[in-house]
Amino acid sequence: MRELFFRSYITILVTLLITVSLVLGGVQAFNNYRFGKLANNMLAGPMMILAQGYANTPESSRPLFAEQMRLIMPVPLTFSQSEQTDGVSITHNWQQDNAVAVARYKGYSVAAEVNGFDQLAAKLSVLLIINDISQVPTSMREQRFSELQALMHYPLQLQDVASLELDASEKFELSRNKVLTRQTNNGDNRSTQAIATPTDRTALIYGPIPTFVAVPLELALLMVLVVILVTALGTWPALLPLQKRLQRMADSVGEIDRGDMDHRLPVEKADALDDMAVAINGLADRLIGALDAQRTLVHAVSHELKTPLARMQFRLATIEGQVADKTYDGLERDLQSLSQLVNELLEYGKDHPTHAPLTPETVELHQLVKVTWQAQHHNDSSVEFINQVPKPTYIELDRNLASKLLSNLFSNALRFCHSKVAVDFDESTMLLSVSDDGPGIPEKQRAQVLQPFFRLDPSRQRGTGGHGLGLSIAHRIALWHHGDLWFETSQWQGAKAVWLLPESLEGSA
């Protein structure tokens, strides 16, 4: 039951770990998407301006245009011919803050690699715009500026320099014809603005441009680990009562299995576990009914047989000497066998601790074995009995039932042994064994011999008789004692009956 609980708990944790992997992968994908969108918005317009300028420049002047752009632009540029359709393609790596943009226009292409993305891309855009406007006549610059505004994704405007709030260092930067970049923070929103002064009085302002701020993987991992920890701490107390309920149900089923047929599983809540408890309780009720019916039938048949058996034995006694001795002896053996069967049936069907508790007491095991053997064997010297039970050994047992179990094991050993029967007890394992030097029991039939009315192959019985109930009764008594009974091979290659004794019969009285 505890394994089921831990398997469920481990399954939840494994599920959470898979969730961690998915969350981290999702964060990576989300950052990649945001960076890609920003890169496309910032670079598509400027790169198309650059490609248009290169394509519209006369062929003889294109090398000079390319050289000038390389000098003006703070990024590596590559100019070439292209057979692809017009457009802009951008590849990016948000972890390295890097993007490669390729713009194609009228059979020509321009490629640029931008590192240190935000501010550099903004500067690149402003420089390209200023250069582009400077190439057209003054009368057409306003129109061209409107066209460029349409190409750019972020706000592009001209403003009077005097209206700008600039500090001394910013004014100095602009006076050197440098592109000034400003970063602003507004709560969680960060942005970049690029400013240049193409004339003394006019400022070109591009932005604000959102600054890319990646969701840190460390933060995402920390959050997920916190979720796992909280889930684990919350799941443990939630699953623990379930595990305890399942353990109580398992203990109750064990009580029924050990013979306490009046025990029932607790019904605690209206849920699936209670449905199972109700079903098991119903099964136990039906099982009691079947056992009672079987016991009643066995008692009735056995009692009905005892009367005609007594009459047959009486009539047999009256004809002694009137029939051949061989015939008389055969009839007597048959009647004794039939009488033994009836007695075993009555014993098998007794209302023992299936319904009533045991009567435990402290028993000296060596003496119990000795007395039971003497009662069973009648001091016949043809069989060597070896009692290896340590003396004294005190065990808590139902004396009468334990004596009956040993008697049945001794009866089976005497029926099949050649000349030796031995009893041994290992207190460390609580195993008592009864071994003989007979033909043994085939391994495939060792479980079957404990079933009612099962008899070994006739070739192995050597005319020893028996009706297959003695070992079944012994097995039942072992189970009543919260133990078990099984067969192995003895040191003489015969049969070895092993009885697992209880360490305590607490709760059985």
Image (tube, rainbow, N blue to C red):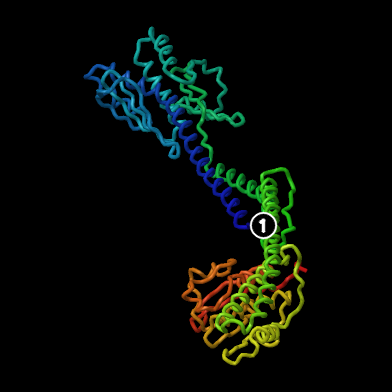
- Regarding residue 49, the answer to whether it shows in the image is yes
Left or right: 284, with 385 as reference point: right
x%, y% of residue 208? 52, 24
The C terminus lies in which quarter of the figure? Answer: bottom right
Q: Amino acid at mark 1?
A: Ala
Vertical relation: 202 (above or below) 209: above
Residue placed under numbered mark 1 in the picture: 250
Quarter-of-image position of residue 395: bottom right
**Which quadrant of the figure has residue 136?**
top left
**Front-most of 386 and 53?**
386
Horizontally, residue 334 falls left or right of residue 50, namely right
In this view, which residue lies farthest toward the bottom?
381
Decide: is 37 above or below 362: above
User: Which residue, as the protein is rendered here, is positioned at the far front?
Assistant: 322
Q: Is residue 482 visible?
A: no
Instruction: Name which residue lies at 42% across and 13% down.
Output: 145
Q: Residue at x 56, y 27 (%)?
A: 167
